Amino acid sequence: MKEKDSPRIEKAIEVARKAHEGQLRKTGEPYLVHPLAVKKILEEWGMDEDTIIAGLLHDTVEDTDLTLEEIKKEFGESVAFLVDGVTKLSTARNGMRDIDTYLPATKDNFLRLMIALGDDIRVLIIKLADRLHNLRTLSALPPDKQKKIAKETLEVFAPLADRLNMGLLRVELADLSFKYVDPRRFEELKTLIEKYNQSAEKSLKKIEDEVKTALKKEKIHFKLSGRVKSVYSLHKKLAKHNQNINEIYDLTALRIIVDDVTDCYLVLGLIHSLYTPMNGRIKDYIAMPKQNGYQSLHTTVITKDKRVVEFQIRTEKMHEYAERGLAASFYYNEQKLTENYKKGKIEHLPTNLLWITELQMTAAKLREGKRVDLKKLKINLFADKIFVYTPKGDIIDLPKGALPLDFAYKLHSEIGDHVVGVKINGKMSNLNKKLAQGDIVEILTSKNQTPKQSWLDKIFTSHARSKLLRALRFEKSPDSEPKKKRKSR
């Protein structure tokens, strides 16, 4: 914990203590241990004060008598906004079943749902901090719960961390989870990595010394360190390469951090003058960043003693972003995005992440006590989407304006062709009713029902329209085979 907290944070700790008084975690500890741990994680990630306060209070609205209005009155609109977002995410997750029973699309749609409901990126960061601490203490739960939470983390939360480019977090979430999902395989791969590193230690030390000498000779300021591949990453890589460890070229890598982009390319040339680069293994993620904003130069080389080594070359800022992702982006930019930063310079981000700058500018104004339209804190990645549920809990994504027949044809063309009615949230409805975010939709069918021309007025999506038109053409065809023999598509 920090030696000295701000008065607002101290007040939030006291509010959380009173709200959770008498509650215990499965570990037997007072419940307050959990929000304090989330606070510490958020501080390590360099998050702002409102985020840290919301992290302390993230479970209060759902699990205690404290209300959102009381939080707003005590800590302001921004904190209440964040706590409300985390509560919505928890509510959405709590209504779902075991991840093994979902339709394949549901796993990705749950990730999309989280992002869509996470009105402010900080909501997702709080949720990830919450999940990280829960995983660190997962041993207190019974084995069936351990496995369920671990699987869900691998399927949803680790990919979410990856989308936000929070590399260190993704690795820890994945490895902690894999340890519970497949403990035998985890230990086997962990031992394999340890043995490889022991055998490679002397050779890597020699390579490090050679590179350091060359960089110093060119008077390039640098930091050099080793990076060992995580257990879960190795598990996934081996699956792609038929379990052949000799096909894994980045089991260990040397990371070189320099002052600026020019030095990155100078170092790349220097490495290639020392060792032989492998064909097709040079990747320029600086010129063309990954989708999540990751930037670095990667090259795999063959050394004089025939050892294969990967080098990663990046600036300090690229490294921080690679490790902490959007949390680092907040940390670097928040001061520059206030009116006090006269030039109004915004740090460069890849085009697909430009929404972050708008988010940060709005959040900075909030921290200054200025009035803002909170709708501007919305993440627009899925602004045109709604997420609805089947009665079994599967999530189906549809565009805004979608109708029950769109939902039916999204499930399967055979379901769409035989619709006789629909229940929305347990009540009978009609086919002209627009679906809303979070609706539970049950399609009623009959084998005797056939597609109707009038349904074209009850459809919104091009996908459903094409399926219906195809079915109508099939019905009109005089030489068509009996409907019951038609193949499902």
Image (tube, helix red, strand yellow):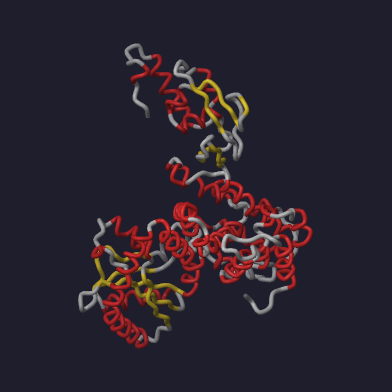
Left or right position of 232 against 11: left
Query: Which residue is drawn at the image coordinates 24% and 61% (left, top)?
Result: 244
Instruction: Using the image as rendered, state which of residue 7 and residue 47 is in the foreground.
Output: 7
Residue 306, percent from left and from top: 20, 75
Residue 261, percent from left and from top: 44, 73
Question: In the picture, which quadrant includes the C terminus?
Answer: top left
Q: Residue furthest top?
A: 478
Would you say residue 345 is visible in this rendering?
A: no
Query: Which residue is drawn at the image coordinates 61% and 64% (left, top)?
Result: 34
Query: Which residue is drawn at the image coordinates 42% and 21% (left, top)?
Result: 471
Left or right position of 146 against 61: left
Instruction: Using the image as rendered, state which of residue 242 and residue 350 is in the foreground.
Output: 242
Residue 412's image quarter? top left
Residue 426, percent from left and from top: 61, 30
Query: Which residue is drawn at the image coordinates 58% and 28% (left, top)?
Result: 423
* Image height of 444 relative to 1, above or below: above
Residue 230, percent from left and from top: 38, 66
Would you say residue 488 is visible in this rendering?
A: yes
Left or right position of 16 against 244: right
